Image: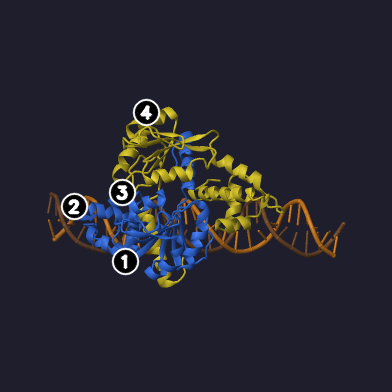
Chain colours: A blue, B yellow, C orange, D brown
Amino acid sequence: MKTSEKNIERLLLYRRILISLKNGGKTNIYSKQLASLADCTPEQVRRDIMSIGYSGSPVHGYDLKKLINSISEFLDANNLQKVALVGLGHLGRSIIDYFQGRRPKLMIAAVFDRDPDKIDRVMHGCRCYSTEKILEVIPKENINVAIIAVPASGAQGVADLLVQAGIKGILNYAPVKLTLPPDIYVENRDMILAVEKVAYFARKITTEGSCT
Amino acid sequence: MKTSEKNIERLLLYRRILISLKNGGKTNIYSKQLASLADCTPEQVRRDIMSIGYSGSPVHGYDLKKLINSISEFLDANNLQKVALVGLGHLGRSIIDYFQGRRPKLMIAAVFDRDPDKIDRVMHGCRCYSTEKILEVIPKENINVAIIAVPASGAQGVADLLVQAGIKGILNYAPVKLTLPPDIYVENRDMILAVEKVAYFARKITTEGSCT
DNA sequence: AATATATTGTGAATATATTCACAGTGTTAT
DNA sequence: ATAACACTGTGAATATATTCACAATATATT
């Protein structure tokens, strides 16, 4: 089966949920339970799990450990995959705090900032480089994913450099639409648009009643 | 026409793009141009614009100013809509920096944190309250949207309080799936899952070639 | 041993979203 | 004037995603 972005998002969420259930001592789970924890339908859960080639038992449902392994085999790199972070303001620091050390196969391996005061400081084990070093460090460290956490005005320039350095996936937190070659995967996490969106739907609920 | 989440997301993006073009002195635009800036098809642009009841001219395309007004009329509240922010760590502060003052009809009107050192400090004109004041301040200020920017462990508790205080829309940055009543709109912006997702697609591109 | 039960896996039906294709429009060029 | 043009608006076709509905399965119960 062809897997879409939505499939991948759900699989990532399932894994997170499954790991926490496993840590709580659970050994197996039914599609219905997982669906309710992941806010989707049992059919979706079963289809997603089918799509990665794992199958459960009609009696015991899915074996937690095996399912987690199957999902991870499908989603993760074989080896450690390295990530670059550009921008060490409040946002960049919060990304390090939230992310670093949480996923065994992923690590922020290089951090870049323009501010001379930050350069050469070490954060959570990563040295901060000057933005000018992007072209040098990224290929050397074999990094193919980057997170942009700089102000709007600097984002496009940084993105161009990243692409030139060989980055294939960008997670963009800056509130601008980046213009990039079509073979680069971009996920936009524009904070302004996010607040506006939630505000719109909150208003709809407040003035009308329920919604989805 | 019924507007979906995707419609709303695109409309928000169009508006952002249109405003910046207008500031650049442009007075009108064609669906094709806007589509290329927003990374979608001209048909989508035209349908989205149709859905809010605005229409352009086959010769001059869309009048920038009028279109922006129509979109805003559709998306925005009549009066100022107030937003609460919970969590004043690095992430919370970056949200204030990125957001505050950028949208005329939306403002972060109250900030909450657990840390006694932060309480009563003023950030960008918002006083920071103790998290315990949520039930008191939110109804008083008539706030219906909240942003959660606390660590994973505190998020569900905060969310429960917010709902109790009357919040209808939540923008959740904490890496947990919140369990909430069905009449609350939630937008999850889980940073860990976001990095994992981009890493997955970057890897696909790196090992296979293009993708979407 | 036969029956009842709860679950998976999945073809088929439905719903939703996107794209195609073209008639209708007003402007410019001839 | 008339023809050519480039665009919008939109019905129809297509593609994608979700849900329905049920046969197949393996256990527990009588």
Residue occupying the point 46% across, 53% down: A150
Q: State how far apart marks 1 and 4 are (Cα).
A: 47 Å
Amino acid type for the residue under numbered disc 2 = Gly
Q: Which tag, 1 or 3, sits closer to the chain's start? A: 3
Would you name the residue on which mark 2 appears? A25
Mark 4: few, some, or many residues within 10 Å (few <14, many ≥20)?
A: few
- Which of these two is toward me, D26 or B131? B131
Circle 3 SS class: helix
Amino acid type for the residue under numbered disc 3 = Leu
| Quarter-of-image position of residue A18 | bottom left
- Callout 3: chain: A
Is the residue at mark 2 from the same chain as the one at mark 4?
A: no
Circle 4 SS class: helix
Residue B3, percent from left and from top = 52, 46
Residue A185, percent from left and from top = 46, 63
Amino acid type for the residue under numbered disc 4 = Glu
Would you name the residue on which mark 3 appears? A37
Would you name the residue on which mark 1 appears? A80
Q: Which tag, 2 or 1, sits closer to the chain's start? A: 2
